Image (tube, rainbow, N blue to C red):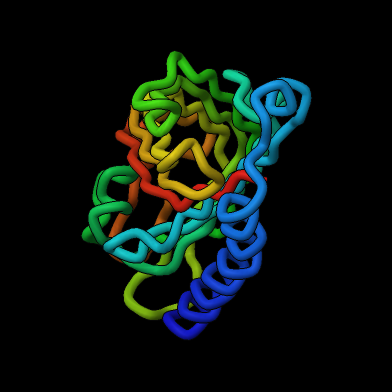
Amino acid sequence: MRIQSRGALKAVLASVALLGAPALADDAGERIPPQERERRGAVLLEFQPPALDASMYGIRLDISPSFDGPFSFGLMTRAGQWGNTVGVRTRFDGAELGEVKLNYAVGADARYTVLTLANGALRPFVGVTAGFEEFVARSGKGPSQGASTTAFLEPAVGVMWRPGAGRLGLTARGGPGFTFTDTRALRVTAGELKLRQVYPTASLGLLVVL
């Protein structure tokens, strides 16, 4: 699993380099006139590298009708690897009984920029993500023993930092999460891991605006 995680990280870093190069060239060269920014849409790519506990990594792709417009909406996906680290313990009761892996999560994402500060460098926003995810559980290093597919809803507040109102920056967000499922218990040899109905969310991502 670690090899797969490293491969995914390398792919993300390579994508960032390829996407960031033209963005940096644009910022270093021609500046987009204010009137053109109003007419021109934008694509916001947000890369979330593996968390410190390696529990999750993902990507968001949002579209904004105008380059500096307050609204954006799009899609997201994320995945994880086996473990019972902090990220898993925030989602499950009884995480010490086994290991859990986030097989996948897919959803829709929307956000609204409340205001712009520091000449566009800081952009506080509110947002919401909704979708479906699948968890699997096991005891030790054995095969998967339990699984649960859930719906989730994650309202959030956050901030985008884009130095010089440019195309590269960082995004931080956090808020509560809610799960909806008929299968809340994942059975393993040592007992049951129970999916929490309410959990905390937090992420830090690399932002590329195209």
Decide: is 72 above or below 135: above
Point 60% across, 26% down: residue: 68
Point 30% across, 56% down: residue: 191
- Figure quadrant of residue 44: top right
Residue 89 left/right relative to 70 = left
- In the image, farthest residue toward the bottom: 3
Residue 56, horizontal then vertical, whole percent: 42, 57
Point 52% across, 24% down: residue: 128
Residue 196 left/right relative to 36 = left
Q: For this rendering, which residue is in front, 200 or 127?
A: 127
- Figure quadrant of residue 182: top right
Q: Answer yes or no: is residue 188 visible.
A: yes
Point 37% across, 35% down: residue: 173
Q: For this rendering, which residue is in front, 182 or 121?
A: 121
Residue 31, horizontal then vertical, whole percent: 63, 41
Residue 161, horizontal then vertical, whole percent: 39, 38
- Figure quadrant of residue 150: top right
- In the image, farthest residue toward the right: 39
Q: Answer yes or no: is residue 147 visible.
A: no
Q: For this rendering, which residue is in front, 29 or 89?
A: 29
Decide: is 101 above or below 107: below
